[in-house]
Image (cartoon, grey):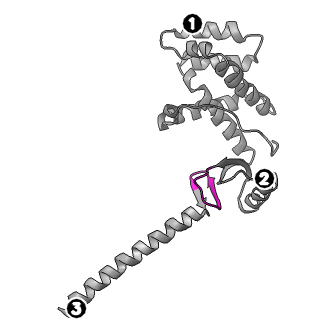
Amino acid sequence: MADNTPPVKTRVESVLEEPSALAVARVYADAFLGALPAGQASEALSEFASFIEDVLHANPEFAALLTSGMVGRDEKIALLGKVLEGRASPLFVDFLKVLAKHERLELLPLISRLSQRRHEERSGFQRVQVTSSQPLSAEQLQAVEQGLASSLPFKPIVEAKVDPALMGGLKIRVGDTVYDSSLQARMQQLRARMRERGLHEIQSGRDRFSSAE
């Protein structure tokens, strides 16, 4: 897998970020990847992402039918066959029909994203979110990526974000761990130390008065 693999564009609703939805979507993502013939993961994931963007997002009425509780499972399966057979790979069409059968089509954006991430991880890659107060130049991004590659046990795929509220430095997120070198973070640390020092001095004063008594 190439270093410049573009991130999958998905618009996942916040409700789909719930642990129960993530757990279910992860099962289907692993099943999807496990069903792919060797060497065809990149092509299949590209087809999946294209279906999300070019079909569902471009045709909200069709997407609404697939996720509507007013449309039965058999109707959804028939609709998928009518629209996609001959236009999409048989394996992908079958996968969508399985999701329709189990009423999980609303998880499609999340399953697509997790499938991409799982494939990256199995290929030795992992996404790293780098946030700065101003957009980083191509040279700066390259330097950050090289620095991360030399210090992390995997090949990073850098996702650059801009947060104007960040005062200098960078905020780097690797999984659930955040490394914050911004001025804002350093000021918060300084305030915390000053608060601790003030509490310590107050307690010391109380101790001296107690001893005097």
Q: Residues within 10 Å of mark 1 (few under 14, many from 20)?
A: few
- The residue at the far bottom in this view is 212
Secondary structure state at the residue bearing disc 3: helix
Q: Residues within 10 Å of mark 2 (few under 14, many from 20)?
A: few
The residue at 61%/62% (across/down) is 182
Which of the pair 61/113 is nearer the observer? Answer: 61
Q: CA distance from mark 3 to mark 1?
A: 82 Å
Q: Where 113 sits versus 50, above or below?
A: below
Sequence-first tag of 3 and 1: 1
* Number of marks in the rendered image: 3
In x, y percent, where is residue 24? 53, 31
Secondary structure state at the residue bearing disc 1: helix
- 155 within the magenta span: no
State the image quarter where residue 9 is shown.
Answer: top right
Q: Is residue 188 left or right of residue 155?
A: left
The residue type indicated by label 3 comes to Ser
Q: Which mark is residue 137?
A: 2
Q: Which residues are magenta?
A: 163-177
Circle 1 is placed at which residue position? 75
Q: Quadrant of the C terminus?
A: bottom left
Sequence-first tag of 1 and 2: 1
In x, y percent, where is residue 1? 81, 42
The residue type indicated by label 1 comes to Glu
Which of the pair 170/133 is nearer the observer? Answer: 133
Circle 3 is placed at which residue position? 211
